[in-house]
Amino acid sequence: MLIKISSLDVKYGYKTVLKNMNLTLDSGEIVTIVGPNGSGKTTLFKAIIGAIPISKGKIYTKPNLRIGYVPQQLKIDQTLPITVERFLKLAHKNFNKSLDKIEALLGSKDLLNIQVNNLSGGQMQRVLLARALINNPEILLLDEATKGLDQPGVASFYRKIENIRNSTNCAILMISHDLHVVMSSSDRVICVNGHICCEGAPESVATSPEYKALFGSDVDGTFALYRHHHDHKHDSKIER
Amino acid sequence: MLDDFMTRATLAGIGVSLAAAPLGCFVVWRRMAYFGEATAHAAMLGVAISLTFEFSILAGAILVSLIMASSVTILEGRSLFLDTLLGVAGHSSIAAGLVIVSFISGVRIDLMAYLIGDILAVSNMDILMIWIGVGIIFSLVIWRWSPLLLVTMSEDLASASGYNPKKENFVITLSLAIVVAVGIKVVGVLLIIALLIIPAASARSVASSPESMGIIAAVIGILSSILGLNSAYLFDTPTGPSIVCVASLFFFILMTVNVVFKNKN
C-alpha cells in the first residue's frame, strides 16, 4: 500500500473543502478522480503532497514515497530566465547521469535549451511529465494533465500513462475531465464533490445515480455534460 | 585607508549592493516588490524603537521587519487581501516610527538619514555589520539556491519534491530583513527596495539563467553605488538617491538595448 487516507477533512479558513475522504492506493493501480470544478480534487492532491494543512483525519504514505507530481499548469514569472534543462535539474541531483533518460522522457533534446517561459502548452505538459518521471516515482499524481491537448494528444497521453504503469508498476492517481477516456483506462473511478459521492470500477460508477446526478443523466461513455446540481444531497452534508 | 570617508562609503555601498543582488532577483521573480517595500517601511518603526530604548538600530530594524513580514505571511494564509494588508502594515509602521522619533527629546535626530540614508557617515563598525550581513545572505541563498528556485516557480512542485515551502520562504523573509537593516545607512528605508529590484530588473534584459541574472544584478548594483557615490560627491547631491538614479539609468539603457536588439531579430 502506497497511500492510505482516512476520514480526511480539509478546510480553507472556515470553509470545508473536503469532508470525510477515504482512499487507499496500491502499486500499479490507475485511479481517476472526477468531479465538478471546485469539488476539492486539486485540494486532495495538495493534501497528499503536504502542501496544505489537513484539519482532520490522517494521510498515511509509505515511508520515503517517491511522488511524481504533474500540476494543472505552471506559470513562471516572465522575469525568471530558466531553460528546460536547468528546470529539470532542480528535480534531480544526479541529472547528468540520466541525461539520456531525460531525452527519452521528453521525446527529444530540442526542448532542453528552450526557456521555460517560451514553451507551448503541449511542450510544457511534456516537460512537466518528464520532470515527474525523472525520480522513478512510485506514484504519479496527474492534475488535469491533458488540459490544452488536442484529441490525438489526449489519446496518446493516456497510452503513455498506461505504458508507464505497465513498465514500472507505478501507481497513478489522476484528476481528469476526459470522462470517455477515464472510463476505458482506469481501474477505479472516484467521483468527488467535497466528499466521495461514489467510487468503484468505471462501469459501476458510470451507472450509479450519484454519478448521473453530478454529470447529467446522458453520460454514456463518450459524452458528458458538466452540469452540477449544487443542492444535491447524499447521506452526508457539507458544512459551509 | 579606512580613514577616508569615500573609501568607507564605497565599501558600504558595494556590500549592500552585493547583498541586495541575489535577493532582489527573488523579489522580482516572486513579485514581492510591495512586500519588500512594506518590510523596509517596518524597519523605520524598528529604528524608532531602538532610538527610544537606546539599543542597536540594526537589531531593532531586523526584528521589527521580521515580525511584520512574518505576521503578514501568517495572516495571508487566512485572508486573501495581501496587498491591502501590506499597505496597512508597512505604512502604519513607518508613520508610527516617525511619530515615536518625534517624542525623543535631547539630541536632534536627522530623520532624512534614516529615510534616504547617509552613506558618507558610515563608521567602520557599520561596514563590518554590512559585510557580516553580506556573508549571512550569501551563505543562506547559496545553500538554499535550488529549493528557493523551485519554490519560486511552484510551491506545489517543491512540496512534492519533499521541500517545505514555508521554510524556504522564511529564508527569503529573513534575508530581506537583513538587507533592509544593513541598507538603512546606505540608501535608507525608502530607497532600499529600489536597490533590490532595479539591478535585478536591469539584469533580466541580458540574463539567460537565474544564476547569470544574480551575477549581472550584483555587477550593476556595485557599479551604481560607485558611480552614484562619485557623482553625488561631484555634484553635491544626496548620495542614496544618486545611487538609485544611476541604477535606474542602467535599467533604461539595458531595456532600450534589449528592445532594439529584439526588434532587429
Image: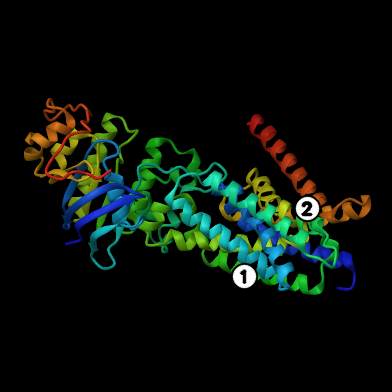
Q: How many marks?
A: 2
Instruction: Specify the quadrant of the image occupied by residue A170.
Output: bottom left
Say left or right for B205 vs A186: right
> Which percent across, then down, holds residue B11?
79, 66
Q: How far apart are the two marked residues, 1 and 2, measured between alpha carbons? A: 23 Å
> Which percent across, then down, holds residue A67?
30, 57
Contact between labelled residues 2 and 1, with CB atoms less than 8 Å apart: no
Disc sitting over residue A167 in the figure: none
Which residue is at the front of the view, B134 or A70? Answer: B134
Instruction: Specify the quadrant of the image occupied by residue A93.
Output: bottom left
Q: Is residue B19 visible?
A: no
Q: Which part of the image, by quadrant, shows the C terminus of chain A?
A: top left
Q: Disc 1 is attached to a residue of which chain?
A: B
Say left or right for B105 vs B176: right
Secondary structure state at the residue bearing disc 1? helix
- Residue under numbered circle 2: B224
Q: Disc 2 is attached to a residue of which chain?
A: B
Identify the residue at horizontal 88%, vertical 53% (top origin).
B232
Q: Are marks 1 and 2 on the same chain?
A: yes
Amino acid at the residue labelled 2: Ser
> Which percent across, then down, holds residue B170?
51, 62
Q: Is residue A175 above or below residue A60?
A: above
Q: Is residue B173 above or below residue B88?
A: below
Within 10 Å of disc 2 (Cα), the crowding (few <14, some 14-19, many 20+) is many
Q: Which part of the image, by quadrant, shows the N terminus of chain A?
A: bottom left
Identify the residue at horizontal 78%, vertical 64% (top origin).
B104
Q: Is residue B126 above or below residue B40?
A: below
- Residue under numbered circle 1: B136
